[in-house]
């Protein structure tokens, strides 16, 4: 480049057959005084026949020139770009450089290669290093000798498991998963009621190990959790076992690779694991909800690390959970339940829908306490083998729900305080009633999930706060 | 230097403050940890006398070198057996 910033700049890399092809052209352009600067992305000794090649192995210049392909020629005039060509095309290059008859013996045209500066994972690193980073979260600095993972433990940022350090390049990559602005406030996270931005969500999603394509689901989960009727504050500071349990519906479950099948409530699936974990890390880090502090759970439950899975929507005859709760068929949605643990129900003997529903009801009435009623909601996830029994008798969602509510409704006299010699129970004034176990409209969240081969249904119990029916409910959020 | 972005609500300083000392030593067992620097023993011997005269149980520990952290088994023993740690002697 001359002192007035005028001339042609070339960006090349040795690992590019087209760059190798045009080396004699670059030499010709340099000899003619047209080519003034050459940047090499991977080897400053390339191209050998061209003088004064600049080492751009840091890719800083490639980043600043916004190079997508190599070879690229850029005409600079007084320090500003006046045009560019990329790849090799004789006519284009002759027109661009004003020099005729270049590239004798070369093919007329050959496409270039991708620039190293836009390889997967590289672009964000360069943006973080040399570009504008739109983050307002403060930097927490460490020496180069510090173990960042250990520092996160020391600072109380983790749930007891290691986190992925939230560096700027990782956060930039995570934000590619959403069009929402980093400074958008999604809501206030209890108990500290601090504003939670998309940026903070992305930071905690990085820490959880999530991928950018999970961000739409994660944002929907946070929005659902912050709806007042989910009562997140109560859920996170309860003495009870519970935490948020997340069910995901819609095409997104397939496109991001969620598990609704075998071991869907267990380990091994990154989307299942990290979406749920992101919410818990946000509660901890942004909301300030930590065990031993405002979180007074007597036991808690393992789901407070993460509890997230997808519904099995492979049978078109089955109405998915989110549609039953008012979402548009085919839409994406998350349903959040104030839940805990897992009760395994296994019945290999039932051969009719009614038999199976009666059997399942015997287990369901034990949730929270056998003699307590209308105090908790449950997720009931039917495995393929149990679903087949219902379907063969012509039962769908409506029939199963009706049967379960019917068979979990019991005489009040057996449930009142003192009945059966047990102090726990319901108000003695209800002795003459038939008392339902669950609220009719949202008490049983029925869905399909699980792998084949086991005659099982999974029951995910719920928080006692649900006894306040009008203030505490599961939330479904379409997105 | 390297850095990460703060995942919290940023309600506290990035530089952490040391844990506050308890308001008094009533009922506490005192661990005296010798960091193996010159004359540490002499200093801790005198501290042991003072704590003992005041009625506090004392346990003695020693780490191999003042330039390195104590071995995990020493730290674990202190955590199990004592409530307060005095380590010395630095210059």
Image (spheres, helix red, strand yellow):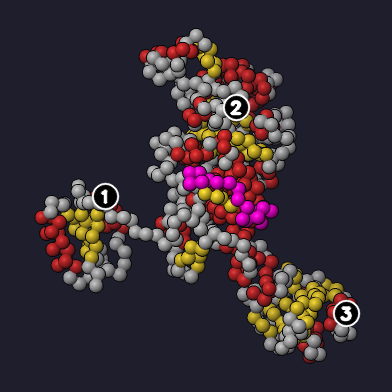
Residue A420 placement (x, y as % from top left): 40, 13
Find residue A220 and report its image quarter.
top right
Dot 1: within a 10 Å radius of its alpha carbon, few (fewer than 14), some, or many (20 or more) residues?
few
Q: How many numbered marks have been drawn onto this rendered protein structure?
A: 3
What residue appears at the point 51 percent right and 55 percent down from the top-left corner? B7
- The residue tagged 3 is A95
- The residue tagged 2 is A442
Is A449 drawn above or below residue A364 in the view shown?
A: below
Residue A137 placement (x, y as % from top left): 54, 59
Q: Does label 1 lie on the same chain as label 2?
A: no
Task: Please give the chain letter of the residue carrying mark 2.
Answer: A
Of pointers 2 and 3, the one earlier in the residue sequence: 3
For label 2, the SS is: loop
Q: Quadrant of the N terminus of chain A?
A: bottom right
What residue appears at the point 40 percent right and 20 percent down from the top-left corner? A424
Task: Please give the chain letter of the residue carrying mark 1.
Answer: B
Task: Please give the chain letter of the residue carrying mark 3.
Answer: A
Dot 3: within a 10 Å radius of its alpha carbon, few (fewer than 14), some, or many (20 or more) residues?
few
Residue B66 placement (x, y as % from top left): 27, 68
Left or right: where A211 falls relative to A153: right
Could you tell me if the residues under marks 1 and 3 are in contact, i.e. CB atoms within 8 Å? no
Foreground mark, 2 or 3, reads 2
Secondary structure, magenta segment, majority class: loop
Cα gap from disc 1 to disc 3, whole angstroms: 81 Å
**Rendered image: mark on residue B80:** 1
Cα gap from disc 2 to disc 1, whole angstroms: 49 Å
Left or right: where A415 falls relative to B89: right
Could you tell me if the residues under marks 2 and 1 are in contact, i.e. CB atoms within 8 Å? no
Find residue A416 and report its image quarter.
top left
Q: Which span of residues is magenta-colored? A: A176-193
Is A175 drawn above or below residue A50 in the view shown?
A: above
């Amino acid at each position: 480049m001359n002192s007035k910033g005028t001339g042609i700049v070339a960006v090349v890399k040795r690992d590019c057959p087209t760059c190798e092809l045009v080396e004699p052209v670059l030499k010709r352009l340099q000899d003619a005084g047209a080519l003034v600067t050459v940047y090499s992305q991977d080897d400053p000794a390339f191209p050998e026949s061209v003088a004064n090649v600049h080492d751009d192995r840091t890719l800083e210049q490639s980043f600043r020139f916004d190079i997508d392909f190599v070879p690229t020629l850029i005409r600079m005039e007084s320090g500003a770009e006046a045009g560019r060509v990329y790849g090799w095309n004789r006519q284009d290059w002759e027109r661009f450089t004003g020099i005729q008859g270049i590239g004798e013996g070369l093919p007329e045209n050959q496409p270039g290669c991708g620039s190293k500066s836009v390889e997967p994972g590289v672009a964000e690193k360069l943006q973080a290093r040399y570009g504008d980073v739109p983050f307002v979260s403060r930097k927490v600095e460490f020496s180069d000798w510090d173990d960042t993972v250990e520092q996160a433990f020391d600072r109380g940022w983790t749930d007891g498991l290691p986190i992925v350090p939230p560096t700027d390049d990782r956060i930039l990559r995570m934000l590619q998963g959403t069009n929402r602005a980093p400074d958008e406030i999604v809501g206030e996270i209890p108990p500290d009621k601090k504003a939670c931005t998309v940026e903070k969500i992305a930071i905690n999603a990085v820490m959880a190990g999530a991928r950018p394509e999970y961000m739409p689901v994660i944002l929907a989960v946070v929005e659902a959790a912050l709806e007042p009727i989910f009562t997140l504050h109560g859920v996170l500071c309860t003495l009870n076992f519970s935490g948020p349990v997340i069910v995901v519906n819609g095409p997104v479950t397939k496109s991001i690779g969620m598990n609704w099948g075998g071991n869907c409530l267990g380990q091994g699936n990154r989307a299942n694991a990290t979406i749920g974990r992101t919410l818990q890390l946000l509660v901890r880090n942004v909301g300030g909800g930590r065990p031993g502090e405002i979180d007074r759970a007597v036991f808690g439950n393992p789901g407070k690390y993460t509890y997230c899975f997808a519904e099995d929507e492979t049978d078109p005859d089955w109405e998915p959970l989110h549609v039953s709760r008012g979402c548009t068929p085919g839409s994406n949605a998350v349903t959040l339940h104030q839940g805990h643990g897992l009760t395994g129900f296994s019945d290999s003997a039932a051969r009719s829908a009614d038999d199976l529903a009666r059997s399942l009801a015997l287990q369901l009435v034990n949730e929270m306490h056998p003699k307590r009623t209308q105090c908790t909601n449950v997720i009931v996830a039917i495995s393929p083998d149990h679903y087949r029994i219902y379907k063969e008798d012509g039962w769908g969602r409506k029939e199963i729900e009706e049967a379960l509510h019917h068979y979990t409704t019991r005489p009040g006299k057996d449930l009142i305080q003192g009945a059966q010699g047990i102090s726990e129970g319901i108000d003695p004034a209800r002795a003459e009633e038939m008392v339902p176990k669950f609220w009719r409209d949202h008490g049983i969240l029925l869905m399909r999930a699980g792998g084949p081969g086991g005659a099982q249904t999974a029951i995910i119990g719920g928080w006692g706060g649900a006894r306040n029916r009008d203030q505490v409910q599961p939330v479904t959020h379409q997105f | 230097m390297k850095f990460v972005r703060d995942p919290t609500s940023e309600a506290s300083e990035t530089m952490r403050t040391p844990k506050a000392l308890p308001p008094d030593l009533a009922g506490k067992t005192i661990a005296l940890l010798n960091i193996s620097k010159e004359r540490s023993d002499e200093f801790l011997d005198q501290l042991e006398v003072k704590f003992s005269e005041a009625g506090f149980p004392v346990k003695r520990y020693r780490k191999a070198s003042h330039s390195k952290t104590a071995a995990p088994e020493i730290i674990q023993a202190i955590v199990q057996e004592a409530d307060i740690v005095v380590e010395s002697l630095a210059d």
